[in-house]
Image (tube, rainbow, N blue to C red):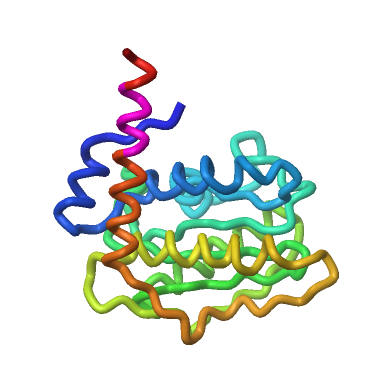
Amino acid sequence: MILFTMRDVDFQRLRLWLTMPALFRYLERDFLSQQHSSNIVLLRPSMSFMLIQTPNPLTLKDALPNFSKTTHIFLPINDCRNANQAEGGSHWSLLLVSIVDGVAFHYDSLNPSNKDEAITTTKKLGILLGKQLQFLDLPDSPQQENSSDCGVFVCVQMKHLLLKKLMRANKQQKVSMSLGGKHIDAGQGRKTMLEIIEGFRKEGERRRS
């Protein structure tokens, strides 16, 4: 069962920073769950935060998904420094790790705000996977024009990379992971998310009635 709180809706209506849990639940339900043969993992924000905060990532093996057959991992990167406040902070960016290529691509809409956090996450994930990962910060990533659209950018970027690049490519095909030149309409993204959240709310009411 997928739940959205009024906090998610209030952030949408007030045109403020979107909460990542809402975005991830939406993508997991509407996209990844329909790709039964997909080897792509969307790591939840709380798990990504736990990874960056844990000194020895090997201790998290039982808490994290089994990556033995995974080809790509999407991770939200947050600038929160308080280990007791998961999913806090003030800025989100996106890390896409291609395990098959050994490369971690970083998309930051306020580049280079989260670069240090992304590098740390890449190193710890490499330890967890037992594989050295090359970190690539992509300076041509679309940039936001204010301080509140990072959640929208992460969602739109993730959806585009997932549907327009990874899921359209065959196993032998090389795909450019650059988003250079891509325009992101944050206002439309917020509107779409509000409609999705409202749809989940009405679905929950129907189930309870």
Residue at the left extreme of this rendering: 14
Left or right of residue 80: residue 168: right
Q: Is residue 201 magenta?
A: yes
> What residue is shown at x 40% (from left), y 70% (from top)?
114
Which residue is pictured at 70% across the width and 65% down the height? Answer: 168
In the image, residue 115 sits, relative to residue 93, either above or below, namely below
Visible in this render: residue 84?
A: no
Q: Residue at x 36, y 79 (%)?
A: 143
The front one of 7 and 138 is: 7
97 to the left or right of 87: right
Q: Position of residue 197 (x, y in %)?
A: 33, 42
Q: Percent x, y for residue 91?
A: 32, 63
Q: Which residues are magenta?
A: 199-205
Q: Nearer the viewer, residue 66 or 10?
A: 10
Q: Quadrant of the C terminus?
A: top left
| Residue 151 lies in quadrant | bottom left
Residue 152: % across, % down? 35, 62
Q: Position of residue 123 (x, y in %)?
A: 61, 64
Whether 204 is among the magenta residues is: yes
Q: From the viewer's perspective, is residue 85 above or below residue 120?
A: above
**Please, which residue is most extreme toward the right here?**
172
The overriding secondary structure of the stretch rendered in magenta is helix
Q: Which residue is drawn at the image coordinates 33% and 35% (left, top)?
A: 4
126 is higher (above) or lower (below) than 54: below
Side of 31 where 196 appears, left or right: left
User: In the picture, residue 122 is in which quadrant?
Assistant: bottom right
- Res. 187 visible in picture: yes
Q: How many marks?
A: 0
